[in-house]
Amino acid sequence: METVTHHDRTTAYRHADRGGEGAPVLFVHGSGGTHELWKAQLARLSSSFPVVAVDLSGHGESEDVDADPGWSTLSAYADDVLAVAEETGARTLVGNSLGGAVVLHLVLERDFDPEAIVLVGSGAKLSVLDDLLTWLDSDFDRAVEFLHDGDRLFHDPDDRYVELSKESMYEVGQGVTSRDFHSCHTFDVRDRLDEIAAPTLAAVGEYDMLTPPRYHEYLADNVRDGQFVEIEDAAHLAMLETPDALNGMLTRFLNGVR
């Protein structure tokens, strides 16, 4: 892992380059995740272009930040991504779920003009079920099991990927994971999507119940230059469940806009 220090904290990231061309593509994980959720992209795409995957504050090997759930947390996470982008020269941002909200927050609130944006299992508004928010605070085991039930995080995955996702949430911990989901719940930039000028791909697993296809159709229809793609046989974490399909879509999209 490499690190960059900013705002009195250290943010960790993984940088993979197997002879790829162009500026790095920076991947941002979702709630309760780490850079490990992008392991198939780090391993399989870095021969086409350099790949960077960040651990947001309080996740993986990155130092935590003292921030209230909501705008303050999203702003702190955007600082993490911006610091890594500036350190590595990344010009394309890929975000899953909360990571997509962080990418949109960064583009809207900071002086950063990306070459392209990819939003995977995300949305311009990310409301969270009230019961899930309650369980995240009072019964974390129940929250984790709920998220890993059918057609939420996964549709029909390999068991090892389910275990990877669960382990990630427990290692990140209840406090940070709850902060993540509560921050998603407050996120809403539907009235600002027309400010997004970069070519944008909105990609979603066909079975995703957490951020369903209509969220992504809305994104693609309301940014200035948007495309919508549905990924077969996947739910919310398509990067783990159907990595070849997602990687192919990413490569074709980026080859067309970079």
Image: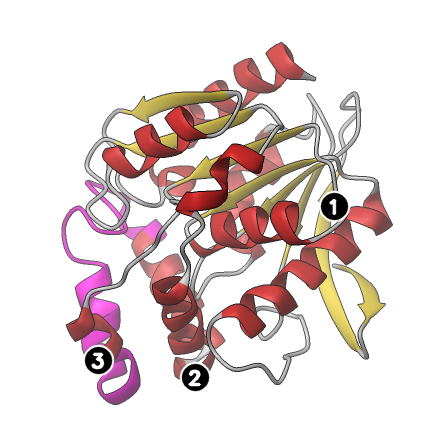
179 versus 35 height, above or below: below
Disc 3 designates what residue? 135
Between the residue at mark 2 and the residue at mark 3, the CA separation in whole angstroms equals 12 Å
| Total residue callouts | 3
Circle 1 is placed at which residue position? 15
Q: Residue furthest bottom?
A: 138
Q: Can you tell which of label 1 and label 3 is closer to the viewer?
A: 3
Q: Residue under label 2, please give it.
A: 175
How many residues crowd mark 2 within 10 Å: few (<14), some (14–19), many (20+)? few
Across and down, in percent, residue 180 comes to 44, 69
Q: Residues within 10 Å of mark 3 (few under 14, many from 20)?
A: some
Q: Residues within 10 Å of mark 1 (few under 14, many from 20)?
A: some
Q: Residue at x 31, y 28 (%)?
A: 217
Circle 3 — which element? Answer: helix
Q: Is residue 257 magenta?
A: no
Residue 144 lies in the magenta stretch: yes
Chain part drawn in magenta = 136-161
> Looking at the image, which residue is at 53% across and 27% down?
200
Residue 75's place in the image compared with 41, above or below, is below
Q: Nearer the viewer, residue 109 or 191?
A: 191
Mark whose residue sits in front, 1 or 2? 2
Q: What amino acid does circle 2 point to?
A: Gly
Amino acid on which disc 3 is placed: Trp
Quadrant where the C terminus sits is top right
Q: Is residue 177 above or below residue 193?
A: below
Q: Measuring from the top left, give residue 254's x and y in whole percent.
A: 61, 19
Percent across and percent down for residue 2 are 79, 58
Q: Earlier in the sequence, mark 1 or mark 3?
A: 1
